[in-house]
Amino acid sequence: MNRSGAQALMQALVDQGTEMIFGYPGGAIMPTYDALYDVREHLRHILVRHEQGAIHAAQGYARASGRVGV
């Protein structure tokens, strides 16, 4: 089965136990969001209003939960 880099990334996140990711769709990242749809039962996406906000949210999540912030 052929899969894209975006699909491989999403599967790697699921395999590593990632439960939540933060982001803002648009432009070149759209293939990743397409792949995210396929694993939506395993990964929760938090939509932010700015790319910088995603970084801060992921860092806060990591500090508060002890899990990796993506």
Image (cartoon, grey):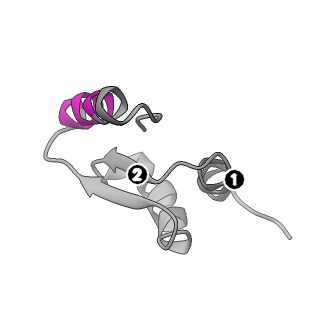
State the SS at label 1: helix
> Which quadrant does the N terminus fall into?
bottom right
Q: Which mark is residue 20?
A: 2
State the SS at label 2: strand
- Which residue sits at x=49%, y=63%? 36
State the image quarter where residue 54 is shown: top left
Which secondary structure is most common in the magenta stretch? helix
The percent coordinates of residue 66 (x first, y second) are 42, 31
- Which residue sits at x=65%, y=45%? 16
Residue located beneath label 1 in the image = 8
1 relative position to 7: left or right: right
Give the mark toward the camera: 2 or 1.
2
Q: Is residue 15 above or below residue 38?
A: above
Q: Nearest the camera: 51 or 13?
A: 13
- How packed mark 1 is, by other alpha carbons closer than 10 Å (few <14, some 14-19, many 20 or more), is few
Q: Amino acid at mark 1?
A: Ala
Magenta part of the chain? 52-60
The percent coordinates of residue 39 (x first, y second) are 55, 69
Residue lying furthest left: 49
